[in-house]
Image (tube, rainbow, N blue to C red):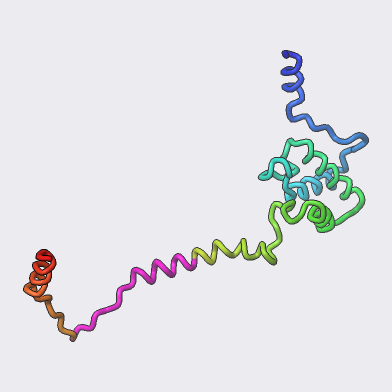
Amino acid sequence: MIGLILSLVLTQGYAPLRQGQDPLDQEREARVQLVGKKLRCAVCQGVSIADSPASMARAQLDKVRELVAEGKSDQEIYDYFVERYGEWALMEPKKSGITLGLWLAPVLMLVIGVLLIVGSTKKPAKPVDAPVEPAAPDDYLAKVRADLEK
């Protein structure tokens, strides 16, 4: 039991590079990190693959490193991940098609809400020359008495 706990504690967060995977030169390694920050970790779901300690994220970052070493552009790398994992793989999905509606919906709802609030607070102005007739109290009392007698 102690051996199991000790092995779990010692291997916590351990995600080694793949066999034979050497870090790139400083410039290309910085590019790997920048591209990795724009790709979502499938395990953590709110974290980029560059920031995630998950072994799957490490493997994806290794793939980014491999694609950078092959001379692929950033867009080609993003396309590679989108092709395999869908638009969800991007930390910031493209603003087109259905996702454009998702980006615009909160703004549209805000505008509609402001218009409703402004429209409900404006009261139409009463004409000054129109006489206001008071309600006859006798008519009202007569109706109440008639209802009570029923």
Q: Residue furthest bottom?
A: 129
Q: Quadrant of residue 138?
A: bottom left
Q: Position of residue 54 (x, y in %)?
A: 75, 36
Q: Is residue 93 left or right of residue 61?
A: left
Q: Position of residue 106 (x, y in %)?
A: 55, 61
Give the mark count. Answer: 0
Look at 9% across and 65% down and name the residue there: 149
Whether 94 is drawn above or below 131: the answer is above
Q: Position of residue 52 (x, y in %)?
A: 72, 39
Along the line of sight, the residue nearer the viewer: 141 or 49: 141
Q: Residue furthest front?
A: 150
Look at 88% across and 42% down and name the residue there: 24
Q: Is residue 55 left or right of residue 117?
A: right
Q: Quadrant of residue 143?
A: bottom left
Q: Quadrant of residue 45?
A: top right
Q: For the magenta stretch, what is the residue range?
A: 111-129
Q: Is residue 138 left or right of residue 22?
A: left
- Reply yes or no: does residue 8 show up in magenta: no
Quarter in which the C terminus is drawn: bottom left
- Reply yes or no: does residue 127 show up in magenta: yes
